[in-house]
Image (cartoon, rainbow, N blue to C red):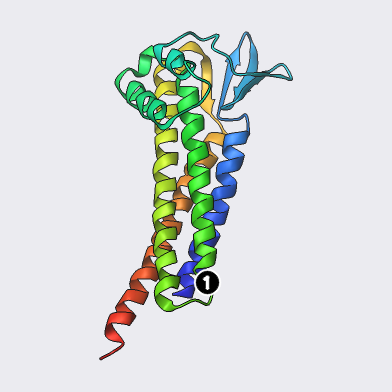
Amino acid sequence: MYSFMGGGLFCAIVGNILLVVSTATDYWMQYRLSGSFAHQGLWRYCMSGKCYMQTDSIGKSHANQVIRANGDFSVGKLAYLLIYCLLFPLSLPSAYWNATRAFMILSAMSCFAGIIAGILSFAHFSAFERFNRSFAAGIMFFVSTLFVLLAMAIYTGVTVNFLGKRFGDWRFSWSYILGWVALLMTFFAGIFYMCAYRMHECRRVAGPR
């Protein structure tokens, strides 16, 4: 049981680090622009040795206007933006930045919460409480996997269908790849913790016999 939990905790910590690095770095995409190579991330794009914040210079969209209606980024707006991205991917050339950023941040937060629950599952409380925490940790890791999957799907779909047609000689880069690796790590972390929980449940049921 503890070997599963230890393996899951290791995968979760690595996955959380990869999520933070992937979200913060500027190498999601590389392309050639005006004869020189450039690269961009979720927050900035860089060319000729200089980096600039992402703007709406690509174009305006209805989803952007909804997001800017108020200063906060509510759950309702997030759900609306996701549905809008899925239904009209080619009509929002810049709103997908916000959706990708939001889901990556939510994924990192869920993974961190799962790590806390996973660490607490090692504490010396009663067996039921301890492994109930391992179940909660597994659920949080699966939630993190879902969020990063949504982020990567939105970014991939819009990049291939829109940005890829604007730039020549483009390719995904290492920050993007780290996002997919983080997805695998959080998924396996959830699997490990669920295995630990099921193993405990089987032993608990078979114990009194």
In the foreground, 90 or 200: 200
In the foreground, 7 or 174: 7
Q: Under tag 1, what secondary structure?
A: loop
Q: Is residue 156 above or below residue 114?
A: above
Task: Note whether residue 11 is visible.
Answer: no
Q: Is residue 192 above or below residue 184?
A: below
In the foreground, 97 or 131: 131
Count of all numbered marks drawn on residues in the image: 1
At x 42%, y 16%, the residue is: 66
In what quadrant of the picture does the N terminus appear?
bottom left
Q: Is residue 54 left or right of residue 132?
A: right
In what quadrant of the picture does the C terminus appear?
bottom left
Q: Position of residue 183 (x, y in %)?
A: 46, 46
Q: Is residue 113 above or below residue 5?
A: above
Q: Is residue 50 left or right of residue 194?
A: right
At x 57%, y 35%, the residue is: 23
- Disc 1: CA contacts within 10 A as few (<14), some (14-19) or many (>=20): some
Q: Which residue is mark 1?
A: 122
At x 39%, y 24%, the residue is: 81
Task: Note whether residue 149 is visible.
Answer: yes
Residue found farthest to the bottom: 209
Q: Position of residue 85 (x, y in %)?
A: 36, 22
Q: Is residue 55 left or right of residue 82?
A: right
Q: Is residue 187 above or below residue 129?
A: above
Q: Position of residue 124 (x, y in %)?
A: 53, 77
Residue found farthest to the left: 209
Q: Amino acid at mark 1?
A: Phe
Q: Position of residue 82 (x, y in %)?
A: 37, 27
At x 59%, y 18%, the residue is: 54
In the foreground, 115 or 46: 115
